[in-house]
Image (tube, rainbow, N blue to C red):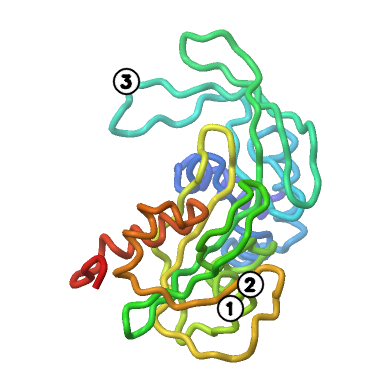
Amino acid sequence: MGSVTQRVEDAIRDLIASGELGPNGKLPSERKLSQDLDAGRTTVRLVLGKLAAEGTIRSEHGRGYFATTGGSERRSDPDSDDLPSWVIRGERTIYDNRWVRLTLVDVEPPGVERFEHHVVRLHHVAIAAVVDEHDRVLMLWRYRFVPDRWGWELPGGIVDPGEDAGAAAAREVEEETGWRPSAPLKHLVTFQPMVGMVDSPHDVYLGEGASYTAPPSDAEEAGRVAWIPLADVPGMIERDEMLGSGTLVALLHILASRKGITPGQ
Protein backbone atom coordinates (compact mmCIF):
# COMPACT_ATOMS: atom_id res chain seq x y z
CA MET A 1 0.00 0.00 0.00
CA GLY A 2 1.08 3.57 -0.64
CA SER A 3 2.29 6.00 1.98
CA VAL A 4 -1.08 7.76 2.39
CA THR A 5 -2.88 4.45 2.80
CA GLN A 6 -0.31 3.26 5.32
CA ARG A 7 -0.58 6.52 7.26
CA VAL A 8 -4.37 6.14 7.44
CA GLU A 9 -4.08 2.52 8.55
CA ASP A 10 -1.53 3.39 11.23
CA ALA A 11 -3.70 6.24 12.51
CA ILE A 12 -6.81 4.06 12.80
CA ARG A 13 -4.86 1.25 14.46
CA ASP A 14 -3.42 3.75 16.95
CA LEU A 15 -6.93 5.06 17.69
CA ILE A 16 -8.15 1.55 18.47
CA ALA A 17 -5.06 0.55 20.47
CA SER A 18 -5.23 3.73 22.59
CA GLY A 19 -8.44 2.54 24.25
CA GLU A 20 -10.04 5.91 23.52
CA LEU A 21 -13.00 4.26 21.82
CA GLY A 22 -13.65 1.85 24.68
CA PRO A 23 -14.93 -1.74 24.32
CA ASN A 24 -16.93 -2.10 21.09
CA GLY A 25 -16.38 1.63 20.56
CA LYS A 26 -17.69 3.17 17.35
CA LEU A 27 -15.15 4.61 14.94
CA PRO A 28 -15.73 8.06 13.44
CA SER A 29 -17.62 8.07 10.14
CA GLU A 30 -15.77 7.68 6.83
CA ARG A 31 -16.33 11.37 6.18
CA LYS A 32 -14.89 12.37 9.57
CA LEU A 33 -11.88 10.07 9.20
CA SER A 34 -11.27 11.46 5.73
CA GLN A 35 -11.30 15.02 7.07
CA ASP A 36 -9.24 14.31 10.19
CA LEU A 37 -6.61 12.25 8.37
CA ASP A 38 -6.49 14.41 5.24
CA ALA A 39 -7.13 11.44 2.97
CA GLY A 40 -9.67 10.55 0.31
CA ARG A 41 -12.76 8.58 1.31
CA THR A 42 -11.78 5.81 -1.11
CA THR A 43 -8.50 5.37 0.78
CA VAL A 44 -10.30 5.39 4.14
CA ARG A 45 -12.85 2.85 2.88
CA LEU A 46 -10.04 0.60 1.61
CA VAL A 47 -8.30 0.63 4.99
CA LEU A 48 -11.55 0.03 6.90
CA GLY A 49 -12.29 -2.93 4.63
CA LYS A 50 -8.88 -4.42 5.33
CA LEU A 51 -9.24 -3.98 9.11
CA ALA A 52 -12.73 -5.50 9.00
CA ALA A 53 -11.49 -8.51 7.01
CA GLU A 54 -8.79 -9.23 9.59
CA GLY A 55 -11.20 -8.80 12.53
CA THR A 56 -9.72 -5.64 14.01
CA ILE A 57 -13.01 -3.82 13.42
CA ARG A 58 -16.50 -4.94 12.43
CA SER A 59 -19.03 -3.31 10.15
CA GLU A 60 -22.68 -3.00 11.19
CA HIS A 61 -25.11 -2.18 8.41
CA GLY A 62 -26.52 1.31 8.83
CA ARG A 63 -24.48 1.98 11.97
CA GLY A 64 -20.85 2.17 10.89
CA TYR A 65 -17.63 0.54 12.09
CA PHE A 66 -16.89 -0.66 15.62
CA ALA A 67 -13.66 -1.69 17.31
CA THR A 68 -13.21 -5.33 18.17
CA THR A 69 -10.37 -7.42 19.48
CA GLY A 70 -10.07 -9.69 16.45
CA GLY A 71 -9.07 -12.64 18.62
CA SER A 72 -6.73 -10.80 20.99
CA GLU A 73 -7.30 -10.04 24.64
CA ARG A 74 -9.22 -6.90 25.55
CA ARG A 75 -7.34 -4.12 27.27
CA SER A 76 -7.55 -4.31 31.07
CA ASP A 77 -8.40 -1.44 33.35
CA PRO A 78 -5.08 0.40 33.88
CA ASP A 79 -5.77 0.38 37.62
CA SER A 80 -6.50 -3.35 37.64
CA ASP A 81 -3.68 -4.91 35.65
CA ASP A 82 -3.87 -8.03 37.77
CA LEU A 83 -7.41 -8.75 36.56
CA PRO A 84 -7.32 -10.48 33.15
CA SER A 85 -9.91 -9.66 30.50
CA TRP A 86 -11.97 -12.07 28.44
CA VAL A 87 -10.53 -13.21 25.13
CA ILE A 88 -12.88 -12.60 22.17
CA ARG A 89 -12.32 -15.18 19.43
CA GLY A 90 -14.95 -14.07 16.92
CA GLU A 91 -18.60 -13.25 16.34
CA ARG A 92 -21.30 -14.57 14.01
CA THR A 93 -24.75 -13.16 13.24
CA ILE A 94 -27.81 -15.32 13.94
CA TYR A 95 -30.54 -12.82 13.08
CA ASP A 96 -30.45 -9.32 11.61
CA ASN A 97 -33.01 -6.74 10.54
CA ARG A 98 -33.34 -2.95 10.65
CA TRP A 99 -34.16 -2.92 14.37
CA VAL A 100 -32.14 -5.65 16.05
CA ARG A 101 -29.18 -7.95 15.44
CA LEU A 102 -28.61 -11.14 17.42
CA THR A 103 -25.10 -12.57 17.44
CA LEU A 104 -23.13 -15.37 19.06
CA VAL A 105 -19.75 -14.20 20.34
CA ASP A 106 -17.00 -16.78 20.81
CA VAL A 107 -15.56 -15.90 24.24
CA GLU A 108 -13.02 -17.34 26.62
CA PRO A 109 -13.21 -15.95 30.18
CA PRO A 110 -10.14 -16.38 32.41
CA GLY A 111 -9.99 -19.92 33.73
CA VAL A 112 -13.25 -20.91 32.02
CA GLU A 113 -13.78 -23.15 29.01
CA ARG A 114 -14.44 -21.27 25.77
CA PHE A 115 -18.13 -20.88 24.83
CA GLU A 116 -20.54 -18.83 22.68
CA HIS A 117 -22.38 -15.96 24.36
CA HIS A 118 -25.59 -14.44 22.98
CA VAL A 119 -25.38 -10.67 22.36
CA VAL A 120 -28.28 -8.47 21.25
CA ARG A 121 -27.08 -5.42 19.32
CA LEU A 122 -29.60 -2.59 19.17
CA HIS A 123 -29.42 0.98 17.92
CA HIS A 124 -27.75 4.00 19.46
CA VAL A 125 -30.39 5.91 21.46
CA ALA A 126 -30.59 9.56 22.55
CA ILE A 127 -32.84 10.79 25.40
CA ALA A 128 -33.56 14.35 26.53
CA ALA A 129 -34.67 15.81 29.85
CA VAL A 130 -35.91 19.34 29.14
CA VAL A 131 -36.44 21.46 32.26
CA ASP A 132 -38.17 24.85 32.35
CA GLU A 133 -37.68 27.91 34.59
CA HIS A 134 -40.19 26.49 37.11
CA ASP A 135 -38.15 23.30 37.69
CA ARG A 136 -40.56 21.17 35.69
CA VAL A 137 -39.45 18.44 33.31
CA LEU A 138 -41.14 17.68 29.97
CA MET A 139 -42.52 14.13 29.98
CA LEU A 140 -44.82 11.73 28.13
CA TRP A 141 -47.51 9.48 29.59
CA ARG A 142 -47.61 6.50 27.25
CA TYR A 143 -48.45 2.81 26.93
CA ARG A 144 -45.76 0.18 26.34
CA PHE A 145 -47.08 -3.17 25.17
CA VAL A 146 -44.00 -5.25 26.09
CA PRO A 147 -44.47 -4.79 29.88
CA ASP A 148 -48.22 -4.13 29.23
CA ARG A 149 -48.41 -0.94 31.28
CA TRP A 150 -48.70 2.84 31.21
CA GLY A 151 -46.07 5.14 32.65
CA TRP A 152 -44.06 8.35 32.33
CA GLU A 153 -41.09 8.63 29.98
CA LEU A 154 -38.74 11.27 28.69
CA PRO A 155 -38.75 11.88 24.94
CA GLY A 156 -36.06 10.07 23.00
CA GLY A 157 -35.36 7.66 20.19
CA ILE A 158 -32.93 6.14 17.73
CA VAL A 159 -30.00 8.14 16.40
CA ASP A 160 -30.00 7.91 12.60
CA PRO A 161 -26.78 6.83 10.84
CA GLY A 162 -24.44 9.82 10.63
CA GLU A 163 -26.68 11.95 12.87
CA ASP A 164 -25.32 13.80 15.89
CA ALA A 165 -26.80 12.29 19.07
CA GLY A 166 -27.62 15.71 20.56
CA ALA A 167 -29.41 16.73 17.38
CA ALA A 168 -31.33 13.44 17.44
CA ALA A 169 -32.41 14.06 21.04
CA ALA A 170 -33.67 17.56 20.16
CA ARG A 171 -35.47 16.21 17.11
CA GLU A 172 -37.21 13.54 19.17
CA VAL A 173 -38.32 16.11 21.75
CA GLU A 174 -40.10 18.19 19.11
CA GLU A 175 -41.55 15.23 17.21
CA GLU A 176 -42.94 13.56 20.33
CA THR A 177 -44.04 16.57 22.39
CA GLY A 178 -44.42 19.57 20.06
CA TRP A 179 -41.94 21.54 22.17
CA ARG A 180 -38.62 22.74 20.71
CA PRO A 181 -35.62 23.06 23.07
CA SER A 182 -34.58 26.71 23.40
CA ALA A 183 -30.83 26.03 23.26
CA PRO A 184 -28.46 23.21 22.26
CA LEU A 185 -28.78 20.25 24.59
CA LYS A 186 -26.01 19.46 27.09
CA HIS A 187 -24.68 15.91 27.25
CA LEU A 188 -25.02 14.42 30.73
CA VAL A 189 -24.02 10.78 30.52
CA THR A 190 -23.69 7.76 28.23
CA PHE A 191 -24.67 4.35 29.57
CA GLN A 192 -25.59 0.82 28.51
CA PRO A 193 -28.91 -0.37 30.02
CA MET A 194 -28.12 -4.12 30.11
CA VAL A 195 -24.38 -4.43 29.61
CA GLY A 196 -24.14 -8.19 30.19
CA MET A 197 -25.97 -9.19 27.01
CA VAL A 198 -27.33 -6.12 25.19
CA ASP A 199 -25.29 -3.56 23.25
CA SER A 200 -27.27 -0.31 22.97
CA PRO A 201 -25.46 2.94 23.85
CA HIS A 202 -27.80 5.49 25.43
CA ASP A 203 -26.84 9.18 25.41
CA VAL A 204 -28.70 11.36 27.93
CA TYR A 205 -29.03 15.11 27.36
CA LEU A 206 -30.29 18.08 29.37
CA GLY A 207 -32.19 20.99 27.90
CA GLU A 208 -32.97 24.30 29.61
CA GLY A 209 -36.28 25.71 28.40
CA ALA A 210 -38.42 25.06 25.33
CA SER A 211 -40.97 26.81 23.14
CA TYR A 212 -44.20 25.27 21.86
CA THR A 213 -44.30 24.88 18.09
CA ALA A 214 -47.21 22.59 17.15
CA PRO A 215 -48.99 19.40 18.19
CA PRO A 216 -46.66 16.38 18.21
CA SER A 217 -45.93 15.11 14.71
CA ASP A 218 -45.39 11.58 16.01
CA ALA A 219 -48.89 10.97 17.38
CA GLU A 220 -48.31 7.26 18.00
CA GLU A 221 -45.39 8.04 20.34
CA ALA A 222 -46.86 11.08 22.06
CA GLY A 223 -49.50 9.76 24.45
CA ARG A 224 -50.10 12.65 26.88
CA VAL A 225 -47.56 15.47 27.15
CA ALA A 226 -47.06 17.23 30.50
CA TRP A 227 -44.59 19.36 32.46
CA ILE A 228 -43.90 17.45 35.67
CA PRO A 229 -42.43 19.24 38.75
CA LEU A 230 -39.02 17.80 39.56
CA ALA A 231 -40.09 17.81 43.21
CA ASP A 232 -42.72 15.18 42.32
CA VAL A 233 -40.24 12.83 40.63
CA PRO A 234 -38.93 10.97 43.73
CA GLY A 235 -42.48 10.01 44.72
CA MET A 236 -43.29 8.94 41.17
CA ILE A 237 -40.20 6.72 41.10
CA GLU A 238 -41.18 5.21 44.45
CA ARG A 239 -44.67 4.47 43.09
CA ASP A 240 -43.10 2.77 40.02
CA GLU A 241 -44.67 5.27 37.62
CA MET A 242 -41.56 5.72 35.44
CA LEU A 243 -40.82 3.62 32.36
CA GLY A 244 -37.37 2.84 31.00
CA SER A 245 -33.83 3.02 32.28
CA GLY A 246 -33.03 6.15 30.25
CA THR A 247 -35.76 8.09 32.02
CA LEU A 248 -34.56 6.97 35.44
CA VAL A 249 -30.88 7.66 34.73
CA ALA A 250 -31.62 11.14 33.42
CA LEU A 251 -33.95 12.18 36.23
CA LEU A 252 -31.78 10.77 39.01
CA HIS A 253 -28.76 12.56 37.52
CA ILE A 254 -30.66 15.87 37.53
CA LEU A 255 -32.00 15.41 41.05
CA ALA A 256 -28.53 14.55 42.34
CA SER A 257 -26.92 17.61 40.75
CA ARG A 258 -29.54 20.25 41.57
CA LYS A 259 -29.97 21.96 44.90
CA GLY A 260 -33.16 23.39 46.32
CA ILE A 261 -35.53 20.73 44.98
CA THR A 262 -37.60 19.42 47.89
CA PRO A 263 -39.71 16.30 47.21
CA GLY A 264 -43.43 17.00 47.37
CA GLN A 265 -43.05 20.79 47.21
Q: Residue 177 shows which numbered tag?
A: 1
Which residue, as the protein is rendered here, is positioned at the far left? 260
Secondary structure at numbered mark 1: helix
Residue type pointed to by label 1 = Thr
Q: Distance between the residues labelled 3 and 1?
A: 50 Å
Q: Residue at x 70, y 75 (%)?
A: 219
The answer to whether the residues at label 2 and label 1 have Cβ atoms under 8 Å apart is yes
Quadrant occupied by the C terminus = bottom left
Q: Can residue 223 be seen in this snapshot?
A: yes
Q: Mark 3 points at which residue?
A: 82
Disc 1 packing (10 Å; few <14; some 14–19; many ≥20): many
Q: How far apart are marks 2 and 1 (CA)?
A: 6 Å
Residue 264 to residue 85: above or below: below
Q: Decide: is 220 above or below 18.
A: below
Between disc 2 and disc 1, whose residue precedes?
A: 1
Mark count: 3
Question: What residue is disc 2 on?
Answer: 222
Amino acid residing under circle 2? Ala
Residue 1: in sight, yes or no? Answer: no
* Image x and y of residue 252, in percent: 34, 58
Image location of residue 111, percent across then percent down: 47, 9
Residue lying at 39% horizontally and 53% vertically, measured from the top left: 239
